[in-house]
């Protein structure tokens, strides 16, 4: 019984971390610590992503990650399920509203 309770307690304590790991990391907004939570990204690649993003602006797609030195096509295939560039639905809606207001 004691072993069961210990296992249950550990499961409850670690559960939030497992859920957080399932969320894709936004490579446009993540800091170095968040980028390093991505399986396959260490400190140097995280810094390279931040430097590229600072110099060139936000990534338009996850495929743009291959423009970062040290990240190739094979790495991208492994990283893609773990990353995002944010929601694409917000920007077009704002643009559509802005275009609609110009027509008036």
Image (tube, helix red, strand yellow):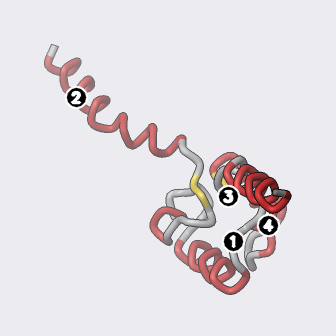
Mark 3 to mark 1 CA distance (whole Å): 8 Å
Q: Which residue is mark 1?
A: 58
Question: Which one is closest to the eye, mark 2 or mark 4?
Answer: 4
Rendered-image quadrant of the N terminus: top left
Question: Which one is closest to the eye, mark 2 or mark 1?
Answer: 1
In the image shown, does 104 or 4 lie closer to the viewer?
A: 104
Badge 2 marks a residue whose secondary structure is helix
The answer to whether 14 is drawn above or below residue 55 in the figure is above
Q: Earlier in the sequence, mark 2 or mark 1?
A: 2
User: Taking 49 as reference, is 18 left or right?
Assistant: left
Q: Residues within 10 Å of mark 1 (few under 14, many from 20)?
A: some
Per the rendering, the mark at residue 64 is 4
In the image shown, does 7 or 49 lie closer to the viewer?
A: 49
Q: Which residue is mark 2?
A: 9
Question: Which one is closest to the eye, mark 3 or mark 4?
Answer: 3
User: Taking 11 as reference, is 45 left or right?
Assistant: right
Q: Earlier in the sequence, mark 2 or mark 4?
A: 2
The residue sitting at 79% across, 66% down in the picture is 64
Q: Residues within 10 Å of mark 4 (few under 14, many from 20)?
A: few
Mark 2 to mark 1 CA distance (whole Å): 41 Å
Q: Which residue is mark 3?
A: 85
Mark 3 to mark 2 CA distance (whole Å): 35 Å
Badge 1 marks a residue whose secondary structure is loop
Instruction: Check contact, mark 3 vs mark 1: CB within 8 A.
Output: yes
The percent position of residue 57, horizontal first and vertical second, equals: 70, 77
Question: Which one is closest to the eye, mark 4 or mark 1?
Answer: 1
């Amino acid at each position: 019984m004691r072993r069961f309770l210990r296992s249950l307690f550990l499961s409850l304590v670690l559960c939030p971390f497992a859920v957080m790991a399932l969320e894709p990391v936004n490579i446009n907004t993540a800091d170095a610590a968040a980028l390093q939570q991505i399986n396959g990204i260490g400190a140097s690649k995280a810094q390279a992503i931040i430097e590229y993003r600072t110099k060139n602006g936000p990534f338009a797609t996850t495929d743009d990650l291959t423009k970062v030195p040290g990240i190739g096509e094979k790495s991208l295939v492994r990283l893609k399920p773990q990353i995002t560039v944010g929601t694409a639905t917000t920007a077009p809606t704002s643009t559509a509203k802005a275009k609609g207001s110009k027509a008036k």
